[in-house]
Image: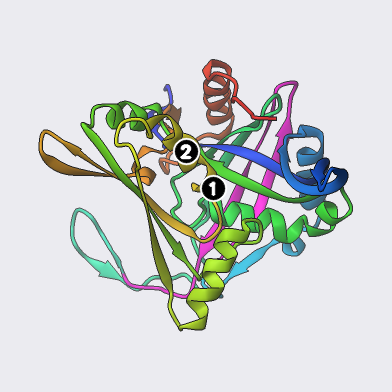
Amino acid sequence: MANKTKQFSFTAFQFDLHYIKQTNKLRLGKKVKNDEYAITWDFQFVYRLLKTIFDEEPLARKMNVKDEWFTLLDDLQQDEKYIYGKFKSAAYGTKANLIHADTLESRENPKDKREGEEMYTHFLIRKEDGFMLLQSTDVRMGRSKVQTYLEKFGSETISASKYTDLNICSLVSSNLLEDIKKLDKVKSTIIEISTKEKSDENEFIQELQEETDSIYGTHVLLEFKARYAREGLGKMIPFIQKYKGQKGVTAIKVVGEQSGSDRTFNVDSYSERYRPAIKVDTNNSPISDDLYDKIKKIGDDRDLLKRGE
């Protein structure tokens, strides 16, 4: 009998590597060397980073989160065009009674409090440009946790390289630009910054977080007013891309006016997403081999990223 299929959601990202680039600047008529943070992509380094982590014993590459759940890199493969694999995670510490969907009869849950149901988060990285797809079934295993995991277990590999750190940035769907174009006026862009996850790459965000901490605050809202309601449109998407996905930035909103009424767009709602139909097993879990084939097809069809290097 043929396998059933089910749609699974994937969010698109851009995988960046940061390094310090030396440039020459004129100062008082003299050339002075200046260090600048720059962004690049190197699939060989990223695969080496992942492979170094994957080659460790499972318990040595397991990341515990608040003693409530854990995650680890559970599969890693590559072919000519892609790096791909999956993370395994499980939550534990609760064991409510089980209830039958048809009879409503309940029984005691037999699992131990240190046990949890296995969840898998599949990913794919295109070697040519760093385009990345991350399965968004498990809400715990989002962009931030994957980045934290790679930084934690890949710290030695990163420090031994020419790169300072890595960043996985959300890609904004073209639908956002189309909806913004329909506005009569673009009034402002609002950025919310939290002190919970400290930025390690953006000095502006770091300074704001320190100021917020100094007054025992947890969040700060910045509103950037548009000087010219229509002319600022072309610069808005690069501005959003600059801050979206940065550590500490919890929300970005665009405020405008259409037909006399205010409209607000939450940028997170416009992340680039895909929902391929994947073959599932008897537990309705995706069959990895079919999943890898489907997301490779998305990578084949998706345009190359316009990297500004």
> Residue 120 shows which numbered tag?
1
Q: Within the image, what quadrant is residue 233 found in?
A: top left
Whether residue 48 can be seen here: no
Whether residue 85 can be seen here: yes
Q: Quadrant of the C terminus?
A: top right
Image position, residue 268 (x, y; %):
38, 45
* Range of residues picked out in magenta: 69-97
Residue ID for mark 2? 11
Location of residue 303 with respect to 187 vertically, above or below? above
Discs 2/1, front = 2
Is 256 left or right of 205, judged from the image as shown? left
Magenta region includes residue 77: yes
Q: Residues within 10 Å of mark 2 (few under 14, many from 20)?
A: some
Assign a secondary structure to mark 1: strand
The amino acid pointed to by label 2 is Thr
Q: Residue at x 68, y 43 (%)?
A: 75
Which one is in front, 221 or 281? 221
Q: Tell me which label, 2 or 1, sits earlier in the chain.
A: 2
The residue most toward the left is 260
The amino acid pointed to by label 1 is Tyr
Q: What predominant SS class does the magenta segment belong to?
A: strand
Is 155 left or right of 275, judged from the image as shown? right
